[in-house]
Structure formats: C-alpha cells, structure tokens
Image: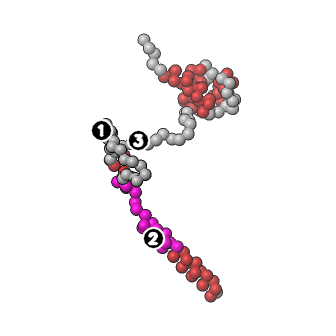
C-alpha cells in the first residue's frame, strides 16, 4: 500500500512540475498584435504603400464577409429538377424530392452527356447540368 501511495505521489509531482514548465513557456510567448504583424522584418525590405491603398483597421476587419464553404457546390433538389426539366429529361413535379423519377432523369442525362452513370449529381454532372439551370433564369431579351 505504501508503494502505491509513493508511486501516485511521484506521478502527481511530475505532472505538476511539467505543467509549471508549460505555464512558464506560455508566459514567455508574446501575443500577436496588429502592430507586431506590421512591423518590418530584417529579411524583407519595407516599401512605401501606394497612395491608393487604405490601411485595414480592426473595425474594418469585422465587416469582412465569411468565405464560402470549401469543396464543390452542392445543388438543391429544386435546382436539379429544374435543370433536368429545362434539359428535357424530367417531366415530374418540381418538389425538391429526389425520388425514382428524378434519379432516372439524372441517369438519362448522364448517359446522353457521356458522364459516369450513377444517378448522383456530383461535380461533373452538375457542371454539365447547371448550364440548363442558368438558361432557365436568364431574362427574355426583347
């Protein structure tokens, strides 16, 4: 029992000492500020900015819009059905449900366009199909 108590005590002491070292290392690190980022580096020569460049302030950075999600665009069921209908492959209702009629229309479209026939609208199928969706929303020129 004494051995167990000694081992547990030693583990706790070692854990406490290693945590203190990490805390000390963290205290030595300086936080990154806008000033430290904009400070010139010895290896990069500093050139004056053109007069047309406006510096970005902290308040302006809050107004920046978020980036779009990474990866290929995933179309909605309505977009898929509308594009298939415009392409002449789908005759059902546009109801946002990818059921058997829509899957069959996707497969027919893939066959007709020399794409891999899997019944799924992946990036290559959507690239070909989205052209018909774009044609459906273009205004009529008079």
Residue 126 x %, y %: 59, 30
Residue with the mark numbered 2: 24
The one nearer the camera, 84 or 93, is 84
Residue with the mark numbered 1: 51
The one nearer the camera, 45 or 115, is 45
Q: In which quadrant will I find the N terminus?
A: bottom right
Relative to 3, is 125 above or below?
above
Q: Quick check: can you spot residue 60?
A: no
Q: In which quadrant will I find the C terminus?
A: top left
Q: Few, some or many C-alpha atoms within 10 Å of disc 3 (few <14, some 14-19, many ≥20)?
A: few
Check residue 20 for magenta coloring: yes
**Chief secondary structure of the magenta span?**
helix
Q: Secondary structure at mark 3?
A: loop
Residue range of the region highlighted in magenta in the rendering:
18-36
Residue with the mark numbered 3: 65
Residue that sits furthest to the left in the current view: 51
Q: Residue at x 67, y 31 (%)?
A: 119
Residue 67 x %, y %: 46, 41
Q: Secondary structure at mark 1?
A: loop
């Amino acid at each position: 029992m004494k051995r167990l108590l000694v081992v547990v005590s030693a583990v706790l002491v070692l854990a406490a000492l290693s945590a203190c070292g990490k805390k000390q290392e963290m205290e030595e690190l300086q936080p990154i500020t806008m000033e430290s980022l904009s400070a010139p580096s010895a290896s990069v020569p500093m050139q004056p900015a053109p007069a047309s460049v406006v510096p970005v302030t902290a308040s302006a950075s809050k107004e920046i819009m978020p980036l779009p999600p990474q990866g290929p665009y995933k179309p909605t069921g309505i977009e898929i059905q509308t594009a298939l209908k415009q392409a002449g492959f789908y005759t059902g209702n546009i109801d946002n449900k990818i059921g058997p009629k829509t899957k069959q229309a996707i497969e027919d479209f893939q066959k007709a366009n020399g794409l891999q026939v899997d019944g799924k609208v992946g990036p290559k199928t959507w690239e070909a199909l989205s052209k018909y969706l774009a044609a459906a929303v273009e205004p009529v020129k008079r």
